[in-house]
Amino acid sequence: MNSAATKMLCRLLIVSIFAMPFQVARAGMIGTSQAITATSAQADRDAVIATLSRADVASQLQARGVDTSAATERVASMTDQEVRALAGQIDSLPAGASSSSTGWAIAIVAAILIWYYYK
């Protein structure tokens, strides 16, 4: 019984190997500029999609009536030049942090008070 099952399995594997379509693989040299362009375009696309997946951005999109998945699909369908322009605009926007140093001053004073009362 075991030998019949093994023979049948071997025959099935042989038939499946011959039934698979074979494709010719081609290798070629590409220029450095092509490799960098493809890599940077994908990195820009990933950065824009990561920005869209942030909670604050998603809530602003929802407030304006735009679904986050629809926005992600739209970014996926954009050309590399459009994505590069959008990523450049995102990179040039302010981060939203305050330029004053009161937060750092409060943190330092709190750390000093904690250290003083600890010792």
Image: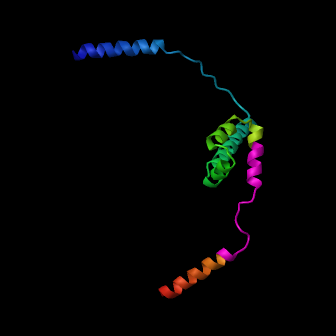
User: Seen in the image, is 16 located left or right of residue 37?
Assistant: left
Q: Position of residue 27 (x, y in %)?
A: 64, 26
Quarter where residue 108 is shown: bottom right
User: In the rendered image, which quarter contains the N terminus?
Assistant: top left
Check residue 97 for magenta coloring. yes
**What colouring style does the render use?**
rainbow
Who's the residue at 64% across and 48% down the image?
A: 62
Q: Which residues are magenta?
A: 84-103
Who's the residue at 60% across and 53% down the image?
A: 55
Front position in the image: 67 or 114: 67
User: Seen in the image, is 98 located left or right of residue 8?
Assistant: right
Who's the residue at 63% across and 52% down the image?
A: 59
The answer to whether 119 is drawn above or below residue 78 in the figure is below
Q: Position of residue 95 (x, y in %)?
A: 71, 60
Front position in the image: 115 or 49: 49
Check residue 57 for magenta coloring. no
Q: Position of residue 104 (x, y in %)?
A: 65, 75
Q: Position of residue 67 (x, y in %)?
A: 64, 43
User: Seen in the image, is 89 located left or right of residue 118?
Assistant: right
The answer to whether 2 is drawn above or below residue 41 in the figure is above
